[in-house]
Every structure is written in structure tokens, then in C-alpha cells.
């Protein structure tokens, strides 16, 4: 069967107000398309990647309820046979059990090595589906259609895929680049407020790493962004994706500069592990607290001015994000146990933790030179008393 794609306006035309960012990785490069109505016309973008009229969509129950029919209708309208794999939502889905389920269902759906798998969801689905694609038949191509703010600005770009271990977050996985990313900003309208706020932490991160102008823009325009104004949302996703694409092009496998993208994550991932990857703390909330901790530690070590720490914390508070571990409901481990959780960080080298610290807003840097006694003293002050 011949698959026929419909004619459509140029990605960068005023008619659809979409923009295309190219991730330059030689034969692993791909486009990030950002705009409105992309899921309605998803087949137009996906068809060129299909060797035969067949694909599989991996999604979760929440996304399926709101958007799966729109995506499948677009694909089936041009004669594509679609298998849908629907998983429970939440961080606990990033597990060996879910990976086995997905791989078995993909094989049962007769997905071959040259076919394309579609990851249709937030960061959890993107990470899990991408990892499944990386190992299925020793490597199958996949497309990211991110449906959360966090996934659109961060996790869908760059090829990091994986699942969690009981010992830590994202410790099992692979670098496996997608062949296309479709970021439809319209789907953000159905995102719960808490999820949108959590994704916003990853947006702020790009300003804090090396773009103070973007941080200032966010400080002035976050109400418009949260209010749903399309141009503000498009600008936010585009600016974030351009920043991430540039770093990924320079350091695809995180041997150097790409580690800057983990600002706040060493602390944040440990907090997620300490709360059992539960709804007590979702990823972006952990990142928000972790970024304040990184700025606070940087200030205590003499790198970061107090006013920059105060500005970051005030901004995150203004959008309703937590900024201190003491705000997390329930018990947290003490400093020694928390340090053990931090030590599972993927950036550790020869047992030495790598930190992303800062000399101020837009001045993040990578270091392993943090004395353990200084860190332990800091953790004892940050974590609630036992």
C-alpha cells in the first residue's frame, strides 16, 4: 500500500506558526518541529519515515484519554496500521516490568527493525519508549511526540532514554536519538497545573545555565506563559530546545559540557529516590528544589552572590514550585543516607561526585572539587531533622 501524505504549509510559515530546529548530529540528526495543531496533522510529518504503512504508539492512560484518537485518526486516514500500547501514568512506569511489557507488545504487533515506534507522552513515556526502541531487535527507530512541558523543552531532545532502578533514577538506559520530535503546544492546554509547573523548572534551568536574558524574560512573562498565550509558549519551547540542541551537538554522550543540563538534578534525583518516585514529589519539583540547593551550596562555597540565590528562589516560589526539602510531605533520610542516594548519580567518576554549581544566574559550571565535610554540613542544614 502506498502511503500518501497531504500537502501542508511550510513548517516556518505564518499560516501554522510552527518552527523547525535542526539537531546536527551527522547521520543521527533530526528536526524538532514546534507549533500548534501538529497532532491533528501528524501523519504529514510521520509518513516520510515509514517504510511500510505500520507503526506502534506507546502512551499512558492520561494522554490516551485526551489525545490518542486524534493521533490515530491522522495516521489511519492515510492507511497506516496502528498498534497502541497504553501504560499507567507516573514515574513508577519507568521499570523493568514496563520495559518487558512494551517490548513483548511491540513484538506481538510485528514491529520490525526498520519500522518506527512513536513515543506519545511525557518524560516517562519518552524515556521508556525510547529505551524499548533502542533494544528491540537490536535497535528500532522512534519518533518523540512529547505531551508535557517538561518533555517538550527537555527530555524529548538529546537521545537519553532509560528506566529507573531501585538504586536510583535513570541508571539503566542508552543514548538513542529519535528521528523526529513533534512538539504540539496545544496539548499543554490539557496538562494538569502541577505538571505544567513541574515542567517549568526545566525551562528556568536554561536561563540559569548560561542565558540570564531568558531568565529575565521568564521573570517578566511567566504569567502570560502560565495563562496559555500561544506565542509565549512557543517562544519558551523554542528557546529551550535551541539551547538543548546546541549543547547536545557539542557533547552528545555527556563527556563534558552536556552535564550542565543536570543543574539541580543531582540533588533532585536523590530527593525523588528518597520519596520513592511517588506523588509526594514529581520530577520537576525535585529539580526546582535541587536548583535552589545548587545555588545555595555555590553561595556557601563563595561562588555565587546572595542576591542571585534570592532571585532564583523568589522566582520559583512565584510560580508555586517548592524550593526547600522541608516543604516535602513526610519523612526524608538524614544527611548520610541522602549522600548515599546522591552517590548513585550517573555523573560520578571513580566514586567522586560531579556537581553543577554556579557563579550566578547564567554562570553554571562543572566541578568535582566539593569537600565531603562541607557537603555533609550543607545537607544537615538542608534536610529536616530526624
Image (tube, rainbow, N blue to C red):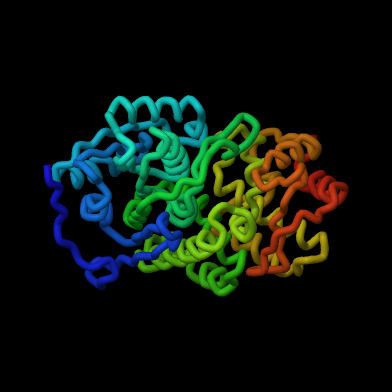
Instruction: State the residue at coordinates (85%, 51%).
Output: 371
Say whether residue 40 is visible.
no
Q: Is residue 125 left or right of residue 215?
A: left
Q: Is residue 100 left or right of residue 35?
A: right
Between 188 and 60, the one nearer to me in the picture: 60
Extreme residue toward the right, this view:
373
Q: Residue at x 52, y 72 (%)?
A: 217
Q: Is 333 above or below relative to 257?
A: above
Which residue is depicted at the point 67% across and 43% down? 345
The front one of 81 and 221 is 81
Quadrant including the C terminus: top right
- What residue is rendered at 41% in x and 31% in y? 88
Residue 194 picture location, percent across and down: 49, 47
Where, quadrant-wise, is the N terminus in this rendering? top left
- Whether residue 113 appears in this view of the structure is yes
Left or right of 369 in this view: 240: left
152 over 385 or under it: above or below = below
Give the image location of residue 300, x and y in percent: 81, 60
Using the image, determine if residue 212 lies above or below residue 205.
Answer: below
Answer with left or right where residue 289 lies relative to residue 55: right
Amino acid at each position: 500500500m502506498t502511503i500518501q501524505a497531504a500537502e501542508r504549509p511550510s513548517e516556518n510559515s505564518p499560516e501554522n506558526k510552527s518552527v523547525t530546529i535542526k539537531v546536527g548530529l551527522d547521520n543521527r540528526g533530526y528536526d524538532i518541529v514546534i507549533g500548534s495543531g501538529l497532532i491533528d496533522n501528524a501523519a504529514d510529518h510521520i509518513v516520510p519515515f515509514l517504510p511500510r504503512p505500520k507503526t506502534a504508539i506507546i502512551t499512558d492512560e492520561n494522554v490516551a484519554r485526551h489525545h490518542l484518537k486524534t493521533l490515530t485518526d491522522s495516521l489511519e486516514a492515510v492507511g497506516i496500521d496502528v498498534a497502541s500500547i497504553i501504560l499507567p501514568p507516573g514515574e513508577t512506569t519507568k521499570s523493568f516490568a514496563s520495559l518487558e511489557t512494551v517490548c513483548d507488545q511491540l513484538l506481538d504487533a510485528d514491529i520490525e527493525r526498520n519500522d518506527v515506534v512513536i513515543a506519545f507522552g511525557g518524560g516517562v513515556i519518552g524515556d521508556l519508549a525510547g529505551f524499548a526502541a533502542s533494544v528491540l531487535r537490536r535497535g528500532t527507530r522512534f519518533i518523540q511526540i512529547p505531551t508535557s512541558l517538561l518533555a517538550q523543552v527537555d527530555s524529548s531532545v538529546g537521545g537519553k532514554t532509560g528506566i529507573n532502578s531501585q538504586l536510583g533514577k535513570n541508571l539503566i538506559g542508552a543514548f538513542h536519538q529519535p528521528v523526529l520530535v513533534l512538539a504540539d503546544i496545544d496539548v499543554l492546554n490539557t496538562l494538569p497545573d502541577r505538571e505544567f509547573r513541574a515542567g517549568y523548572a526545566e525551562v528556568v534551568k536554561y536561563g540559569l545555565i548560561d542565558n540570564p536574558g531568558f531568565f529575565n524574560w521568564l521573570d517578566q512573562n511567566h504569567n502570560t506563559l502560565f495563562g496559555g498565550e500561544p506565542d509565549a509558549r512557543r517562544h519558551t519551547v523554542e528557546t529551550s530546545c535551541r539551547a538543548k540542541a546546541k549543547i547536545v551537538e557539542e557533547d552528545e554522550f555527556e563527556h563534558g559540557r552536556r552535564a550542565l543540563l543536570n543543574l539541580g538534578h543531582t540533588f533532585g534525583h536523590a530527593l525523588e529516590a528518597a520519596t520513592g518516585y511517588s506523588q509526594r514529589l514529581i520530577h520537576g519539583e525535585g529539580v526546582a528544589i535541587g536548583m535552589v540547593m545548587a545555588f545555595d551550596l555555590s553561595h556557601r562555597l563563595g561562588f555565587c552572590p546572595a542576591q542571585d540565590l534570592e532571585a532564583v528562589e523568589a522566582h520559583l516560589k512565584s510560580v508555586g514550585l517548592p524550593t526547600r526539602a522541608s516543604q516535602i510531605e513526610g519523612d526524608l533520610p538524614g544527611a548520610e543516607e541522602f549522600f548515599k542516594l546522591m552517590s548513585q548519580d550517573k555523573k560520578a567518576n571513580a566514586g567522586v561526585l560531579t556537581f553543577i554549581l554556579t557563579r550566578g544566574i547564567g554562570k553554571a559550571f562543572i566541578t568535582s572539587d566539593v569537600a565531603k565535610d562541607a557537603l555533609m554540613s550543607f545537607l544537615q542544614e538542608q534536610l529536616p531533622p530526624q
